[in-house]
Image (tube, grey):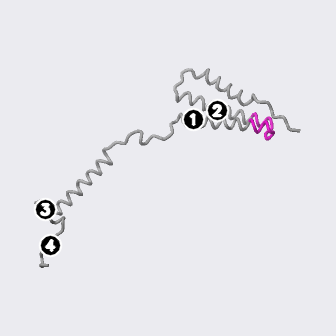
Amino acid sequence: MAAGKPIATPMNDVLSLIDIPGGPDALALLGCIALTAAVFIFVFLIEPDASDSAPHRSRLDQLMERRDTIYDNLRDLKFEHRTGKFAEQDYEQMRDTLETEAALVLAQIEEVTGNEASLPRRAAAAAAVRAASTDAAPLKSRG
């Protein structure tokens, strides 16, 4: 190997074919500048889609799930009252609380869906919730 002669590599062969003012250092600097510009364009100029930041569950889905949970709680409360776990006064207080919460959730569902006839439906929904929680007779004890 002769002293002072550069080692032949594939990159040196390619670069020797291209006559760039400033040599390979200028080409590397140009590449860094292009990469930096691409990063700035991507970060600052490209707007994300609204669907990218949207929650996976809509407000209506959350309200429907909350409504179903309240109905399940009312059903469980009614069952536990029939089995004698709750005194009448405690049962009525908890039932009224759950019914009020159910009526509020139903009103919110109507607001989200844009239902125009909300007042008559709210009253009917509250009556239906009350009827559903009081319609069953107490369990007969096994003797």
Q: Are marks 2 and 1 in contact (CB under 8 Å)?
A: no
**In whole angstroms, how far apart are the C-alphas of marks 4 and 3?**
18 Å
Q: Magenta span covers which residues?
A: 78-92
**In whole angstroms, how far apart are the C-alphas of marks 1 and 4?**
73 Å
> Is 21 left or right of 113, judged from the image as shown?
left
Viewer-side residue, 121 vs 78: 78
Viewer-side residue, 56 vs 102: 56
Label 3 sits on residue: 22
Q: Secondary structure at mark 2?
A: helix
Residue 58 coordinates in the image, percent (x, y): 50, 36
Residue 142 occupies which quadrant of the picture? top right
Residue 127 coordinates in the image, percent (x, y): 68, 25
Q: Which mark is residue 6?
A: 4
**In whole angstroms, how far apart are the C-alphas of marks 3 and 1?**
66 Å
Q: Is residue 88 magenta?
A: yes
**In whole angstroms, how far apart are the C-alphas of marks 2 and 1?**
10 Å
Residue 107 occupies which quadrant of the picture? top right
Task: Name the N-terminal-most of marks 1 and 4.
Answer: 4
> Is 28 left or right of 56, judged from the image as shown?
left
Label 1 sits on residue: 63
Q: Which residue is at a point 45% across and 40% down the rendered structure image?
A: 54
Residue 31 coordinates in the image, percent (x, y): 22, 57
Q: Which residue is at a point 84% across and 34% down the rendered structure image?
A: 140
Q: Nearer the viewer, mark 4 or mark 2?
A: 4
The C terminus, quarter of image? top right
**Dot 4: few (<14), some (14–19), or many (≥20) neighbours within 10 Å?**
few
Q: Are marks 4 and 2 in contact (CB under 8 Å)?
A: no
Amino acid of disc 1: Leu
Q: Which residue is at a point 76% across and 36% down the rendered structure image?
A: 91
Q: Which mark is residue 102?
A: 2
